[in-house]
Image (spheres, helix red, strand yellow):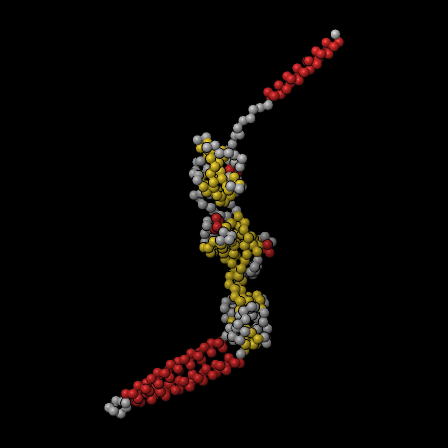
Amino acid sequence: MKYISLFVAVLLLITGCTDNKATEKKAIPETTSPEYHKAIVEKGSVASVIKLPAQLAAYMEVSIFPKVNGYVKAVPVDIGSKVSKGSLLMVLEAPELEQAVTQAKEKYARSRADFTIDKEHYNRLLEAAKTEGAISPLDLSTIHSKMEADSALCNAEKSNWRMQETMMGYLKVTAPFNGIITERNIHPGALVSALAKDQPMLELKQLDHLRLQADIPEGIAGNLNDKDTVFFYVSALQGKKMTGTISRKSGNINLQYRSQRVEIDVPNKEGLLSSGMYADLILHPKGNIEVLCVPKSAVVTSTEGKYVFRIQDKKIMKVNVSTGNSSVDKTEIYGELKPGDIIIANANDEIKESL
């Protein structure tokens, strides 16, 4: 009797476990196909703010080298000197050049005297030739040819004299524009050569007017226009916000970086800015109103490229796209899409097409 009761208890325990497992198995929900959030492709650009590195440069700058050989006689300027156009920057001396000018002048005077004598001789023979048989035509022609040759020689000597005088003018170096001397590598007594181009004597820069230079990605540069307002910050001025307008676009795309050089004119009358300063350029590109925009999460970026999933006739199709401006939640796209198309808003690379 005792063994029968124990057998019944074990049997009931096994039956209870089997029922529990069956109940648990029935409680597991069946797998359902995922539901995707949908979005509509819209027409219109996306406003964005872009921060790019830029650098300030002098509006005009020039490295000054000697035009003639000579000794430095005087340098009335130094680093930091403010000069005006035509101001004297340096005086050179070259005794051999002065002698060359004197010799050229004397040669011109002698050739001019010879031409004057020949011209007078020709005129007198021409007058005498009016008397028939007094002067032979050959003599008249000979003296005329000599006069023409002396005239050409006189003109050549005059040109040589003027050239030597011009070379003498290079002994005084003057400023080609208003600016500041930013580099000086020469002192009185030094011998300078017109052939040496390794180091300039002086460096002159115009700093009251600067250029802010930046390389803009081609996708953004195409939507920028002259006179567009931009903002920039210079760390040297403790984050002071400054304003400028786009003055020039190079019109050329750098093939290595796919960017275009853009310049902004920056007035600097107070001298707060310097050439070479680093700046952060802030752009607010207007974008193209003809482009399409979608939620940022709808664009999938993978090793296959960028694409979105379009839903059409209850089928999912992959559409390759390229992107433009982006904001926090939206991005511009270019591809085989049109306004009103339905796409998957929460797309990922695990979604499969259903063609």
Residue closer to the observer: 272 or 31: 31
Residue 100 % position (x, y): 49, 81
Asked if residue 58 is positioned above or below residue 52 in the image, the reply reads: below
Q: Residue at x 58, y 24 (%)?
A: 29
Do we see residue 187 in this rendering? Answer: yes
Which residue is nearer to you in this view: 204 or 93? 93
Q: Residue at x 68, y 13 (%)?
A: 12
Locate the N terminus by quadrant: top right
> Going by the picture, which residue comes out furthest to the top?
1
Residue lying furthest right: 2
Residue 295 appears in the figure:
no
Q: Nearer the viewer, residue 320 or 162?
A: 320
Q: Position of residue 212 (x, y in %)?
A: 52, 56
User: Residue 147: percent from the left, percent from the top?
Assistant: 35, 85
- Estimate the x, y position of residue 326 in percent, counting from the top left: 51, 43
- Dividing the picture into quadrants, the one containing residue 203 is bottom right
The residue located at (53%, 75%) in the rendering is 69
Q: Is residue 302 left or right of residue 160?
A: right
Q: Give the vertical position of 238 relative to 74 (above or below).
A: above
Instruction: Choose top left, top right, bottom left or bottom right for residue 6.
Output: top right
Could you tell me which residue is drawn at 60 percent across and 56 percent down?
Answer: 236
Q: Is residue 313 left or right of residue 329?
A: left
- Report the number of numbered marks: 0
User: Residue reaching furthest bottom?
Assistant: 134
